[in-house]
């Protein structure tokens, strides 16, 4: 399970059968795709631009599609790649989780209602939560786990995962790590990505820093929310409405406020 699938699984509210903050998840999933490709040794970032280093298949259909998309582009910048989130990304990830027998996607109560997500393998979700917990505690963790924890912080999912007094310390530690990453990124608003440009030995860590900084900055400034709204969605605070692709479980793709209707504009 890649960074994106793990992130989306953590974002599912098992009681409500919905996804937390879908307008944020869409862009975080896009960032996760890039991290997965770099982790797989198929892409790198040089001078702030994404370059394919190995176009051979990964054995993962989703990653192979993403790799082909980047290969067809002329070295896109990291910001343009993340902002190029396409409609349907959330439903594609949910479908992959369903194929892995982790969740079950059911039809909503009405034809215009979002699908209901049922968690059928809570142990998988608990295992992913434990991976993020290790990062928050400062324990040894893999690059993939640190990347996942970075995205959890970037889209403020940590507030959801570490609610309550007993888990407050973990949330504070994860936030402290995320703030340190954010502080390491130069010129967030212009997204120059100098730390990534100079990466020679630890491109994954530096890319993660850059993505965390960029996502936090643009979420807080409302840029992604505005972009999401321009795609036809509307939201207010913690949205519980989720769109999907037009032929999946009978749910129309035009449902407003969902993870899939808020695709970004390519640039």
Image (cartoon, rainbow, N blue to C red):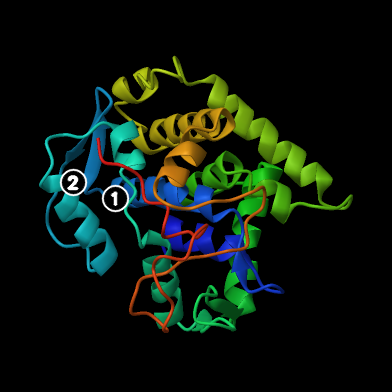
What is the quadrant of the C terminus in the image? top left
Whole-number angstrom distance, CA of label 2 to CA of label 1: 10 Å
Residue lying at the far right in this picture: please name it: 165
Looking at the image, do the residues carrying marks 2 and 1 touch, with CB atoms under 8 Å apart?
yes
Q: Earlier in the sequence, mark 2 or mark 1?
A: 1
In this rendering, position of residue 193 left or right of residue 238: left
Q: Is residue 191 above or below residue 31?
A: above
Residue 253, image quadrant: bottom left
Q: Nearer the viewer, mark 2 or mark 1?
A: 2
Tag shown at residue 146: none
x and y percentages locating residue 108 in the rendered image: 55, 81
x and y percentages locating residue 113 in the rendered image: 55, 75
Q: Nearer the viewer, residue 79 or 129?
A: 79
Q: Which residue is mark 1?
A: 37
Tag shown at residue 70: 2
In this rendering, position of residue 91 left or right of residue 7: left
x and y percentages locating residue 71 in the rendered image: 12, 47
Residue 172 visible at all:
yes
Residue located at (72% from left, 74% from top): 15
x and y percentages locating residue 136 in the rendered image: 67, 44
């Amino acid at each position: 399970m890649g960074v994106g699938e793990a992130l989306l699984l953590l974002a599912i509210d098992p009681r409500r059968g919905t996804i937390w903050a879908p307008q944020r998840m869409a862009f975080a999933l896009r960032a996760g795709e890039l991290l997965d490709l770099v982790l797989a040794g198929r892409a790198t970032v040089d001078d702030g631009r994404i370059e394919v280093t190995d176009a051979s298949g990964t054995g993962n259909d989703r990653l192979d599609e993403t790799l082909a998309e980047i290969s067809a582009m002329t070295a896109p910048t990291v910001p343009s790649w993340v902002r190029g989130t396409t409609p349907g990304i959330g439903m594609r990830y949910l479908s992959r989780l369903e194929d892995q027998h982790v969740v079950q996607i059911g039809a909503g109560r009405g034809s215009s209602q979002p699908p209901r997500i049922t968690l059928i393998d809570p142990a998988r979700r608990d295992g992913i939560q434990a991976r993020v917990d290790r990062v928050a505690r400062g324990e040894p963790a893999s690059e993939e786990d640190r990347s996942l924890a970075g995205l959890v912080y970037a889209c403020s999912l940590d507030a959801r995962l570490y609610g309550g007094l007993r888990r407050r310390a973990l949330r504070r530690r994860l936030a402290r790590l995320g703030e340190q990453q954010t502080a390491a990124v130069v010129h967030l608003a212009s997204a120059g990505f100098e730390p990534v440009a100079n990466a020679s030995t630890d491109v994954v860590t530096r890319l993660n820093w850059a993505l965390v900084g960029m996502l936090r900055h643009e979420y807080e400034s409302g840029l992604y929310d505005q972009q999401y709204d321009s795609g036809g969605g509307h939201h207010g605070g913690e949205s519980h409405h989720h769109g999907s692709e037009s032929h999946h479980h009978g749910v129309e793709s035009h449902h407003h406020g969902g993870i899939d209707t808020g695709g970004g504009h390519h640039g």
